[in-house]
């Protein structure tokens, strides 16, 4: 029996254009149960439930390790094709969850960029990789700025080399003036990357970011650490706690100043709470909180601040957030309309532009618009190839397109570049 069916369930659900609430209603369970199943925080061993889940999602039960009921009817050509694809996707899904050790088992995966990156960062976080040559303290600030630029440009091959060196250098200088603040900012960057790659290392990095931010008294680093912790908490299926973390940080006295950077940090935290409300199915709460974020953005006179904190905050950032929030709340048509308010070329970084096209693709996918979904994914790939081919959310979308209908040369090419076939 498959111990970790979550990524495959999520891919099949997205391919059908369903929200977690839609699937929960069909399976007669809560949305949080589906969330825990998809994230792997809940193990599903009940054969009857697995069989029912396979029936609802039109997945062969054998994909979950459940014996198929013999009907006496030979499978059709489409069934055979889908079963072959799903078998491949099951392996891919397992690799996504279990990390680089599992990913390296398949042909071509040993040198995969994301596996190398995660392995190097894991070694730096756990202290098991002594290969990193520490960045000298006088160069830490410049090196961190350069690494943030590489992240914004989605140059992940450079991050595999730079992040371990930054962490080593930061710890060596932690006791010097400004050293703890520099280390907090580095751990925030690591957390953002691990969140993007769906890696559990994000929890460790977020905790260290918060610790060093508190030690240094860096208000902005502390706010960003709280935001990333809220994201991880939401992804683990705890929306109430995620909201509490984000809103408590936004209401902290330290951010209640007239400094524009503090206003921007509050806005990012409120947007995080709005996105959590969307995932919880609270569309009204999401829109109310988004309105609060927009009001904070309006105080910045159209500028974008905190660019290295996930692309920054401003009016454009709120519009970009609204695409993913409306999609997460189950309203893809409104998400697509929200996208029309954003000019991709106006977004400050390649990472943000790739996110725009990926969010648009997810909305089109939920809406059942296969052609538009593929076009948006290809646009994301042109914008940031390393980001698009590595990100689990993109791989799930491509997997869903592969199993939900006819393929095309463009789709098969994208699937190949994402290492899905």
Image (cartoon, helix red, strand yellow):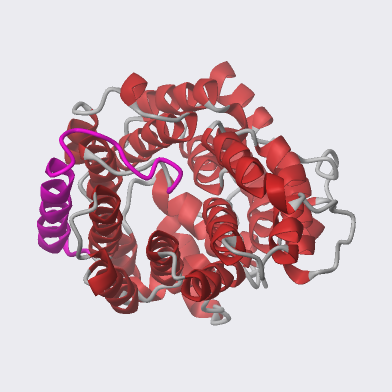
Q: Position of residue 389 (x, y in %)?
A: 61, 35
Magenta span covers which residues? 281-309
| Quarter of the image where the N terminus is located | bottom right
Residue at (85, 51) in percent of width and height: 133
Residue at (58, 58) in percent of width and height: 182
Quadrant location of residue 150? top right
| Quarter of the image where the C terminus is located | top right
Q: From this viewpoint, which residue is outermost toward the right?
A: 131
Q: Position of residue 171 (x, y in %)?
A: 71, 65
**Front-most of residues 248 and 411:** 248
Residue at (64, 61) in percent of width and height: 97
* Vertical position of residue 84 compared to residue 150: above or below: below
Q: Position of residue 118 (x, y in %)?
A: 72, 54
Q: Is residue 386 magenta?
A: no
* Vertical position of residue 373 compared to residue 298: above or below: above
Residue at (39, 68) in percent of width and height: 230
Quadrant location of residue 240? bottom left
* Vertical position of residue 394 compared to residue 267: above or below: above
């Amino acid at each position: 029996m498959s111990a970790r069916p979550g990524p495959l369930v999520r891919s099949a659900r997205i391919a059908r254009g369903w929200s977690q609430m839609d699937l929960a209603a069909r399976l007669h369970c809560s949305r949080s149960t589906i969330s825990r199943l998809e994230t792997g925080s809940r193990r599903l061993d009940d054969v009857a439930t697995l069989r029912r889940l396979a029936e609802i999602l039109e997945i062969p039960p054998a994909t979950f390790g459940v014996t198929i009921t013999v009907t006496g009817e030979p499978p059709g050509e489409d069934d055979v094709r889908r079963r072959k694809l799903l078998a491949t996707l099951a392996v891919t899904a397992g690799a996504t969850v279990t990390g680089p050790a599992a990913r390296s088992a398949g042909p071509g995966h040993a040198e995969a960029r994301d596996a190398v990156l995660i392995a190097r960062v894991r070694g730096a976080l756990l202290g098991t990789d002594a290969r990193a040559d520490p960045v000298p303290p006088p160069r830490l600030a410049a090196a961190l700025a350069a690494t943030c630029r590489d992240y914004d440009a989605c140059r992940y091959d450079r991050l595999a080399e730079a992040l371990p060196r930054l962490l080593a250098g930061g710890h060596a200088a932690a006791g010097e003036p400004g050293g703890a603040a520099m280390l907090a900012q580095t751990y925030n960057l690591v957390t953002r990357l691990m969140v993007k790659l769906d890696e559990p290392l994000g929890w460790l990095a977020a905790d260290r970011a918060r610790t060093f931010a508190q030690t240094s008294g860096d208000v902005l680093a502390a706010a960003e650490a709280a935001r990333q912790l809220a994201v991880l908490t939401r992804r683990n299926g705890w929306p109430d706690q995620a909201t509490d973390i984000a809103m408590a940080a936004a209401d902290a006295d330290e951010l209640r100043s007239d400094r524009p950077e503090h206003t921007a940090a509050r806005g990012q935290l409120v947007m995080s709470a709005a996105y959590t409300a969307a995932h919880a199915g609270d569309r009204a709460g999401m829109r109310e909180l988004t309105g609060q974020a927009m009001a904070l953005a309006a105080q910045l006179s159209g500028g974008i601040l905190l660019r290295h904190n996930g692309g920054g905050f401003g009016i454009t950032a709120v519009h970009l957030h609204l695409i993913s929030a409306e999609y997460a709340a189950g309203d893809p048509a409104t998400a697509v309309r929200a996208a029309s308010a954003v000019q991709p070329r106006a977004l400050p970084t390649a990472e943000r532009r790739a996110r725009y096209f990926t969010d648009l693709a997810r909305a089109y996918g939920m809406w059942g618009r296969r052609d538009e979904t593929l076009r948006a994914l290809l646009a994301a790939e042109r914008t940031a190839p390393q980001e698009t081919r590595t990100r689990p959310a993109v791989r799930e979308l491509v997997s869903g397109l592969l199993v939900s209908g006819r393929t095309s040369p463009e789709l098969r090419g994208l699937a190949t570049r994402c290492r899905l076939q």
